[in-house]
Image (tube, rainbow, N blue to C red):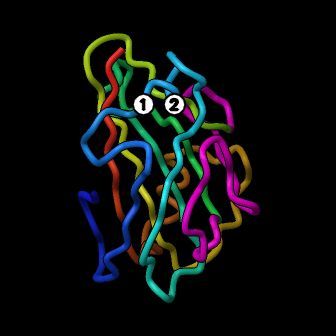
Amino acid sequence: MQNNTVGASGMIISSPAFKDSQPIPEQYSCKGQNTSPPLSFSSPPASAKSLALIVHDPDAPSGDYAHWVMWNIAPSTTEIAANSVPTGAMQGPNTGGRNTYMGPCPPSGTHHYIFELYALDGVLDLPPQTSRDQLLAAINGHTLAKATLTGLFSH
């Protein structure tokens, strides 16, 4: 179910709601309840101190659209239930400016929604207004492993 792995950890991100490169169910989109899908994590590196999650749509007409930005997820986390945020995790603004999950809502065609899970060598001291680009800059050089899950959605 995973596309890419950085490092030799074999870290995996998956979802019981959809398989890699398959459609995301409507309930997790703007056509449904617009809640985050359930996610499962496995095999982060033993040396990981935290996890970060970025969900984005590279097919958006206005450019790569961030749908969910989260960091300081405990490395012991094995799942995130639907419509929830792990205790202690921080959320930054999505491209719409809200510190929450924003479900798929493409204007037309089929878009790819990439769920990127990063295992990090430390805990991040970042303010809640930290954007996706700022988070990526902060984790540069601190990523032990990366795993991806891609979901599709058509409006």
Which one is nearer the viewer's eye here, 75 or 65? 75
Question: What residue is rendered at 37% in x and 11% in y?
Answer: 107
**Most prominent secondary structure in the magenta stretch?**
loop
- Quarter of the figure with residue 154: top left
Q: Which mark is residue 25?
A: 1
The residue carrying mark 2 is: 28
Q: Residues within 10 Å of mark 2 (few under 14, many from 20)?
A: many
Rendered position, 45 above or below 84:
below
Q: Residues within 10 Å of mark 1 (few under 14, many from 20)?
A: some
The correct choice, above or below, for 95 with respect to 32 in the image is below
Residue nearest the observer in this picture, 13 or 60: 13
- Magenta region includes residue 63: no
The answer to whether the residues at label 1 and label 2 have Cβ atoms under 8 Å apart is: yes
Q: Residue at x 44, y 66 (%)?
A: 140
Q: Residue at x 27, y 38 (%)?
A: 22
Comparing 111 with 141, the one in front is: 111
- How many numbered circles are shown? 2
Residue 90, image x, y percentages: 70, 54
Q: Secondary structure at mark 2?
A: helix
Please state which amino acid type lies under the numbered disc 2.
Tyr
Residue 147 occupies quadrant: bottom left
Q: Residue at x 37, y 67 (%)?
A: 12
| Magenta-colored span | 73-99
Q: Secondary structure at mark 1?
A: loop
Cα separation between marks 1 and 2? 6 Å
Q: Quadrant of the C terminus?
A: top left
Q: Position of residue 1 (x, y in %)?
A: 27, 57
Q: Is residue 145 above or below residue 35?
A: below
Residue farthest front in this picture? 16
In the image, 33 versus 73, the foreground residue is 33
Q: Amino acid at mark 1?
A: Pro
